[in-house]
Amino acid sequence: MAISPVALKAYTAAAKAEPTPHAAPTRSFTETVKESLASVNNLQHEKARMVEEFASGKNQNVHELMISLQKASIAMEMTAAVRNKVMQAYQEVMRMQF
């Protein structure tokens, strides 16, 4: 079975191409935590803004309000769960004897 010229051309082009790095750029744990907390904080501010607009009558879209409330709630629950797991890990490390 012969290799078609199209396949051979594609293979040679791929062989000459520069390899792309597959690893994503790394971030520190501190940066990741800061970005996550900022995101949760933004969701909380958005929720408060939408509640104020709904209460004042500026916005009557209940669906968007409820979606905003749920997003903020889920983000806060996830943040609390992560915090609890980090605290458990810290306590476990402190119980270790060296």
Image (spheres, rainbow, N blue to C red):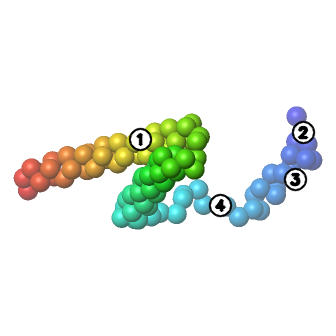
- Specify the quadrant of the image occupied by residue 29: bottom left
Across and down, in percent, residue 63 comes to 57, 36
Position of the C terminus, as image quadrant, is bottom left
**Which is in the foreground here, disc 4 or disc 3?**
4
Across and down, in percent, residue 45 comes to 44, 56
Say which element carries label 4.
loop
Front residue of 37/6: it is 37
Task: Give the residue displayed 88% in from the left and 42% down from the top.
Answer: 3
Distance from label 3 to label 1 (Cα)? 51 Å
Question: Dot 1: within a 10 Å radius of its alpha carbon, few (fewer than 14), some, or many (20 or more) residues?
Answer: few
Distance from label 4 to label 1 (Cα)? 36 Å
Distance from label 4 to label 3 (Cα)? 20 Å
- Looking at marks 2 and 3 on the same chain, the residue that comes earlier in the sequence is marked by 2
Say which element carries label 2.
loop
Q: Is residue 85 visible?
A: yes
The answer to the question of whether label 2 and label 3 lie on touching residues, with beta carbons closer than 8 A, is no
Residue wearing tag 2: 2
The image's mark for residue 9 is 3
The answer to the question of whether label 2 and label 1 lie on touching residues, with beta carbons closer than 8 A, is no
Distance from label 2 to label 1 (Cα)? 58 Å
Residue wearing tag 1: 74
Please, which residue is most extreme toward the right here?
Answer: 5
Amino acid identity at mark 3: Lys
